[in-house]
Image (cartoon, helix red, strand yellow):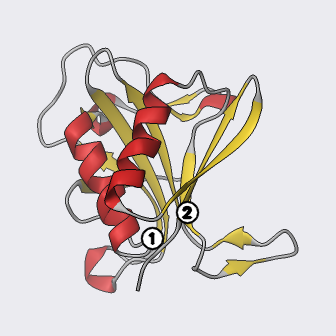
Amino acid sequence: MTWTAQFDVQTADGLEAIIATSQSTVEQALARLLVARHLHTPTVHILERPRFGPVQIPDHGLKIDVCDARGLGALAYVGEVPADLNGGGAFITLAAEFVSDPPALYQDLGGDAVYPPNAVIPLDRVRAALIEFWEQGGQRPTCVDWQPVESW
């Protein structure tokens, strides 16, 4: 099945929905995030996945913040994952190697929630995770490590 990823980016110009249906369009969406001056943390979800509630919230999601100048980023995932991968809930990336003096990356830019330093990963790992998220229809990517968090 071919999946459709929707990247939501809120800038001073308003809410921009970037649609990605291939690896190259996922990479183009990331390129857009690298240059956008966003007001809220960008999110991505798969349009073919279920939604719930009166406002039809996706049953999964991935938040993205990146620092192009440093080649770093961090991700937050919410949704179901296989039981052998800690069940469902909210997770943030877990760095394989600690980055000294990481930039401030926001899990929730509107609420000023900053990712902890151990969540900051190289930009190439962010790219790989976004591609896997799209390829696997919104499942939590396995190409990066995760740690549970209280809220998405």
Q: Residues within 10 Å of mark 2 (few under 14, many from 20)?
A: many
Residue at 57%, 41% (x, y): give it. 42
Judging depth in this view, the residue of 126 and 147 nearest the camera is 126
At 33% from the left and 73% from the top, the residue drawn is 86
Furthest-right residue in this view: 54
Q: Name the residue under label 1.
A: 138
Quick check: 138 left or right of 127?
right
Please name whichever residue, 118 or 74, is drawn nearer the observer in this view of the structure: 74
**Other-residue count near label 1 (Cα within 10 Å), few / some / many at <14 / 14–19 / ≥20:** many
Judging by the rendered image, the residue that carries numbered circle 2 is 45
For the residues bearing labels 2 and 1, Cβ distance under 8 angstroms = yes
Q: Which amino acid does label 2 sit on?
A: His
From mark 2 to mark 1, how far is it between C-alphas? 6 Å
The reply to whether residue 82 is visible in this rendering is yes
Give coordinates of residue 15: x percent, y percent: 74, 40
Q: What element carries label 1?
A: loop
Left or right, residue 131 beside residue 112: left
> Looking at the image, is mark 2 or mark 1 earlier in the sequence?
2
Helix, strand or loop status at disc 2: strand
Query: Please, what is the three-letter code of the amino acid marked with disc 1?
Result: Gly
Q: Residue at x 21, y 40 (%)?
A: 124
Q: Quadrant of residue 1?
A: bottom left
Where does residue 11 sit, x and y in percent of width and height? 69, 28
Q: Which of the two residues, 63 or 29, is positioned nearer the viewer here?
A: 29
Q: Nearer the viewer, residue 106 or 150?
A: 106
The answer to which quarter of the image holds residue 47 is bottom right
- Residue 152 in view (yes/no): no
Q: Is residue 103 above or below residue 18?
A: above
